[in-house]
Image (cartoon, coloured by chain):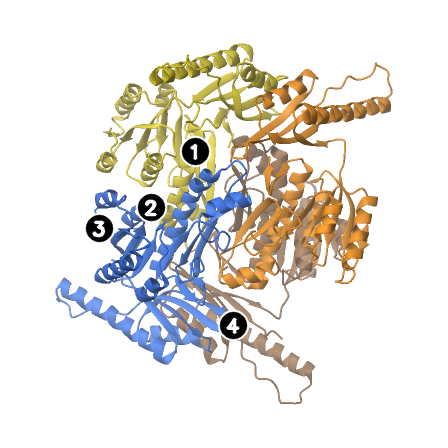
Chain colours: A orange, B blue, C brown, D yellow
Amino acid sequence: MTKPTLIALLHGPDQPGLVARVAGWIFERGGNILHADQHRDMEAGIFFQRVEWEPAFVPPAEGTPGAAVEQSRLRSVAAAEAEFTRFAREELRMAVRIVSSIDRPRVAVFVSKADHCFHDLILRWKAGDFRCDLATIVSNHADLGDVTRGYGLAFHHIPVTADTKTAAEAQQLELLRSLRVELVVLARYMQVLSADFLEKRGGPVINIHHSFLPAFAGGRPYHQAHTRGVKLIGATAHYATRDLDEGPIIHQDVARVTHRHGVDDLVRKGRDLERVVLAQAVRWHLEGRVLVYGNKTVVFD
Amino acid sequence: MTKPTLIALLHGPDQPGLVARVAGWIFERGGNILHADQHRDMEAGIFFQRVEWEPAFVPPAEGTPGAAVEQSRLRSVAAAEAEFTRFAREELRMAVRIVSSIDRPRVAVFVSKADHCFHDLILRWKAGDFRCDLATIVSNHADLGDVTRGYGLAFHHIPVTADTKTAAEAQQLELLRSLRVELVVLARYMQVLSADFLEKRGGPVINIHHSFLPAFAGGRPYHQAHTRGVKLIGATAHYATRDLDEGPIIHQDVARVTHRHGVDDLVRKGRDLERVVLAQAVRWHLEGRVLVYGNKTVVFD
Amino acid sequence: MTKPTLIALLHGPDQPGLVARVAGWIFERGGNILHADQHRDMEAGIFFQRVEWEPAFVPPAEGTPGAAVEQSRLRSVAAAEAEFTRFAREELRMAVRIVSSIDRPRVAVFVSKADHCFHDLILRWKAGDFRCDLATIVSNHADLGDVTRGYGLAFHHIPVTADTKTAAEAQQLELLRSLRVELVVLARYMQVLSADFLEKRGGPVINIHHSFLPAFAGGRPYHQAHTRGVKLIGATAHYATRDLDEGPIIHQDVARVTHRHGVDDLVRKGRDLERVVLAQAVRWHLEGRVLVYGNKTVVFD
Amino acid sequence: MTKPTLIALLHGPDQPGLVARVAGWIFERGGNILHADQHRDMEAGIFFQRVEWEPAFVPPAEGTPGAAVEQSRLRSVAAAEAEFTRFAREELRMAVRIVSSIDRPRVAVFVSKADHCFHDLILRWKAGDFRCDLATIVSNHADLGDVTRGYGLAFHHIPVTADTKTAAEAQQLELLRSLRVELVVLARYMQVLSADFLEKRGGPVINIHHSFLPAFAGGRPYHQAHTRGVKLIGATAHYATRDLDEGPIIHQDVARVTHRHGVDDLVRKGRDLERVVLAQAVRWHLEGRVLVYGNKTVVFD
């Protein structure tokens, strides 16, 4: 059986001995570091670290029933998580986020009518690629309702018009709260989320933009790309922020196109890019590999 | 011995039977088509063709001296070129450009201080990759003079300041005219050529921009890329036009970067992209593979 | 409404005037060439051409009912197909295969338990990427039966063991015959088809091999790749022949891996490659872009 | 002024607390860790680490002359290197290699007639991309002698025939010894080095093979690739071992080719791959980023 692990993502002002202090803290408490990766932004003087370890576990006395052992183990991991968090914040004065292998974060996927990222995310999730629960699919259209239910997943249809946008967003926020959703993934969701929504939401929102940002921000990027006559098209997964298409970039990729490709071909080829780029970004996020600072990301891949 | 070939690049309003008429014209005159490639821009209703053929040659009577046979062959190719041009313009009403294997176009390379594209172009040229003559290297700095002469090539140092720009450009134009230069290649030449220069120049000018245009147009693109936190950097070879960084794109490529790469690393990695992308664009141009229309290119690769 | 088109794939010994004769034949009969692409293998002296055109259609007298007009159009396209085939074979002495836009070839997909290519092909087909009918899914395991039927497609479970292989292949052949299947796609079908099967089958069989062939032919290629410590993994779509993993290659792609990737990671990353490479090969085949000669392919993309 | 740094590459059987012990050792001695990266091969139970740090330096009393300060600093770095080596071997029982920023390793480049990697390595070295001294160029042909001397570098012509191979290798070994060469780079050197040479040599030898190994090992890989009809060609940089083309792979890359590319085109396109792949491998080696174990590499990039 796999032992539980904790992954800590730390960042803050650089100071001497951080690597040693983190490693020492874990070692002294009997933990076993599996991976540790760090980065320094020399200009900004910021230190970043991702460290993954198995916390120590002293099993209860021989003869304790299995369920009680398991309970004990869970309490032990939760305690290690709390202690490390306190250590990082109070002693190291670093910002910290912890991903625990005993948790399964709850994810909501927002879609409209395009279904390529939708199917792709669900099939990968069913294949075990993402360690999370798919709490619900949310859409401003009813089109993907049946197929969602066919997958055995919940579907919430929340229509959005210019007039009802504020109310619809309130409904979405309430839904996310009630389902205890941690991560929202916009899988070609064709509505712009308001700054107000993002602020009230708080948690991370990953979006896929169908261009190689910052080229062709805004609407109809494949049309823009075709008009400009570029020789590569791209896709960009980023955290959504109040500045449309300006959020921290997590992942990007491109594909070659030629004069033979019309806009329809770009759209079709782009679907492959969007699928793979979005899935990779979601996976990295769930594995605690992405650290945001300023408007950039550090990706410990 | 390789037989001489002609390459015609045609474009104009689409009309029925163009492929048949071009192929028929060549076939009836005893020519042998080696390659033919066409493209239709359905929206714009424009037809594009690249056709490469060996024109017929009736050798003079047995016993004619070799040099006279060769003269006869050259005249024959030149005649075929002239006839086809007339056919394309007057009968097909198409724009046409012909690249003849018996010509070696004369090329000038403009450089400043950065020497990676400079060395790369010269070494490829020496290796026989480009069918052209390197008429001269032109620079606004003296730095690369010695190494240019070490390669056995001519070097013209024409300094440019804000005050002398007009005079310097006049001097450059005169130099290009006197050397009968057909193609100008800007190999990280750090001066913006004026609209006036480009208009007077007339002929093609290929530039390498060190970003994935249209992202990061303008100055210091690697700094812009680093600030934005993109995960890919690029390079773009394009024809220079009066609209800076807006000319028709010939070729683009990208390379992956991470948070570990500082601006210096982007510059270093970018050099490899710039070298390869510029060399490919120059090669395609010299092989008559690039057709410009509007602000886009058709590349028959 | 889109006009019907014919695509001819021709190849045979090179001879003067082939381009002109094909274009002339179509033009004289009122056809309109949309695309034409040719290639010469200089060493082998073989000429290859893909030409796509709208055959002429003289509509019946005004007032003819729509259905009768449509019948007339279909007959006209079928006649043009037959005439061109005769012309190519008897006059040009070339091998020819014609893809007509009024036909929808029938395709069978063979699968085992892995479902990533299976879902991918079906979802692309539903999205309209492939012009074909999915006649059936065939599997040596029952696992994908329910989800296939959930897609509204037929599923045939034909178990295969060492003892029953001959009988199972006979059953597969009979099924393909009765369903008039033109193309078989092996979407990670984990049984080797016998030389006898392939010979009796006759028609094309496309396979996806999960390595960059010819590296790591045979079984467990990701294990082989991991053992050898390569820095790129690949996938190869090829036509199946009696020589296992030796058939003509249609398409290949690779992805970067590092020492951090275990065999499981290679398998997971490889799934994305396999999906995209197989789908592209199937699409090219259905669009009449792939021409086999000897053990190689010409792909007119 | 940049402070001196040490880079340690460690590997050996995994044991608890290694990260903490290494970091603690450096921290306790006043060192400042700049980067640390580790990897565990779970199957093999091996731990790998690359750690880069600035060792502490207590400057001599105020008023000490600059040269004496500099001497003191060099002694201090050398002492830290020796102490860490002892610590790693004796206390951690790990294999260790240290790259010190105050050393400049001496490199010999072996070439034959092909000059693309030759020019590329020298130009990158002149541009400051490699932290090393180019001790000499060695060739079995005289062709590149003049251009080497034109670069201001030493050139040794050591002809090799079947009969003289043993003597020639002895001469090469003696040359490398006398020049205190640490790294040998085979830049398309067309002679196979004997197992005896490699054993006597001892130090690392990096080779560039012009295929995507293990595909097309042995001679004339571009011909092999053309015959097989692959759609991608590759290049592989690896450490030379007594098993030809079987040594640990450092880096690989590929480029797309089509049926239009003859062997000559593959050779030409391959040159770009070979240049970039070899240069990257040499750079990673010199930066202490490559750790060999068994027949594989760990590359901390």
Tag nearer the camera, 4 or 3: 3
Q: Tell me which residue sits at (62%, 76%) in the image.
A: C74
Q: Is residue D301 above or below residue A106?
A: above
Which is more toward the observer, A157 or C137?
A157
- Tell me the kind of residue under disc 4: Trp
Which is more toward the observer, A120 or C220?
A120
Tag nearer the camera, 3 or 1: 3
- Where, quadrant-wise, is the C terminus of chain B in this rendering? bottom left
Q: Is residue D279 above or below residue C27?
A: above
Residue position marked by numbered label 1 in the rendering: D281
- Tell me the kind of residue under disc 1: Ala
Which is more toward the observer, D262 or A226?
A226
Tag nearer the camera, 4 or 2: 2
Q: Tell me which residue sits at (30%, 40%) in the image.
A: D115
- Side of D38 relative to A76 (left or right): left
Q: Is residue C237 visible?
A: no
Distance CA(mark 3)–CA(mark 1): 36 Å
Packing grade of label 4 (10 A; few <14, some 14-19, many >=20) is many
Residue position marked by numbered label 4 in the rendering: C53
- Tell me the kind of residue under disc 3: Ala
